[in-house]
Image: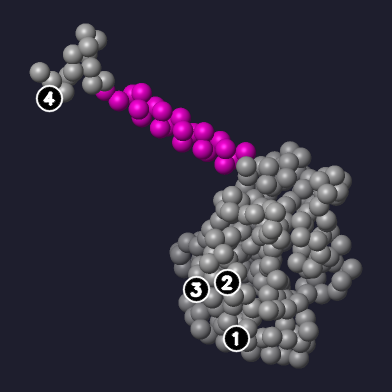
Amino acid sequence: MADLGQRSACGQHCGGRAVTTLPAWAGRLPDGRTYNTCPSAGICRHVCYARHGTYLWPTVRAKHQANLIFVLDDPAGWEQAMLAELAAPKFRGRFVRVHDSGDFFSDDYTRSWLRIMRSAPDVTFYAYTKEIHRFRRLVEPDPPENFLWVYSYGGTQDGRIDAATDRVADVFADEQAIAEAGWSSQEASDLLAVLGPRLVGVPSNRIPHFLRRLQGRRFSQWQAEVDAEREARRGTGRVRSITSAPSLRRRDGRRTDTHAA
C-alpha cells in the first residue's frame, strides 16, 4: 500500500493534513543499495529536522525506507496504489503535502507525481522543493492546477532561485528575524508557505546543536557563504596550477622547449 500518513503538518491551528514521506537525504537500504532522496541538499542537510529525533527511530526509519523501496522497485504499482488511496472520500477537498522529508529526486519520480496530481483533481497537493532546475523543466511549463509549491533556500541550486518572482522559503533564526526581514512567517500554518505571501519565513527548529550551527544566519546566507568559499578554493586551485607549471624559459631568457633555436 501507499503511505499517506495522517498527521498534523501545521499543528492545532489548522487540523490534520495528509503527508507523504521518504527517508531524508542519503543512506543505505537494508539490501545494500544506496540512495539520495535530496540530491540538491546543501547546508540544510546539516540541520535537517528529518535526520533527528523520532525520524531516527528504527520503526519510523523502516517505514520511510519501505516507501522508497516501493517507489524504486515498482514505480507503476506505487503510482496506482497512491491513486487508489487518494480516491477515498476522506481526501476529497483535502490538502496533501508531498514529502515532509525527501524531495523530487528524479525526473521519472517527478513525472509520476504530476500524473497522480492530474488524476486526483479533488485533492490539492503542495510541496517545498530544492529541485529548482527539475521544476523549471518539468513542472513550470505546464503545472497541474491542483499543485502548489515553494522553492526553499539552503540547497546547491540556490543560485537558480529568483527571489523577485519565485515563491520562496528561507529558514530564519526566529520569528523576530523573519519580521525584521519583512518576510511572512508560516509558523501558524504550514499551508501559509503556499497560500500566504510569496516570501515565506520559516523559524528554525529549536534543537540546540542545530541553533549553534546556524549561528543566527538564514539558510540562504549560510549557503551563500559555503558557495563563496567553494568558489574561492576552486579559484585558488586554478592559480596554483598555472603558477606551479614548469617555466618555458630559463633564467637567462632562453626557451627550454624542443623548438628553441
Q: CA distance from mark 3 to mark 4?
A: 55 Å
Q: Which of pointers 1 and 4 lies earlier in the amino acid sequence?
A: 1
- Residue annotated with mark 3: 108
The amino acid type of the residue labelled 4 equals: His
Q: CA distance from mark 3 to mark 1?
A: 17 Å
- Residue annotated with mark 1: 81
| In this rendering, the label closer to the viewer, 3 or 1 | 3
- Residue annotated with mark 4: 259
| Vertical side of 71 occupied by 186: above or below | above
- Residue annotated with mark 2: 141
Which element carries disc 2, helix, strand or loop? loop
Relative horizontal placement of residue 249, taking residue 143 as reference (left or right): left
Q: Circles 2 and 3: CB distance less than 8 Å?
A: no
Q: CA distance from mark 4 to mark 2?
A: 57 Å
Q: CA distance from mark 1 to mark 2?
A: 27 Å
The amino acid type of the residue labelled 2 equals: Pro
Q: Which residues are magenta?
A: 225-246
Q: Which of pointers 4 and 2 lies earlier in the amino acid sequence?
A: 2
The amino acid type of the residue labelled 1 equals: Ala
Q: Is residue 59 visible?
A: no
Which element carries disc 1, helix, strand or loop? helix
Q: Circles 4 and 2: CB distance less than 8 Å?
A: no
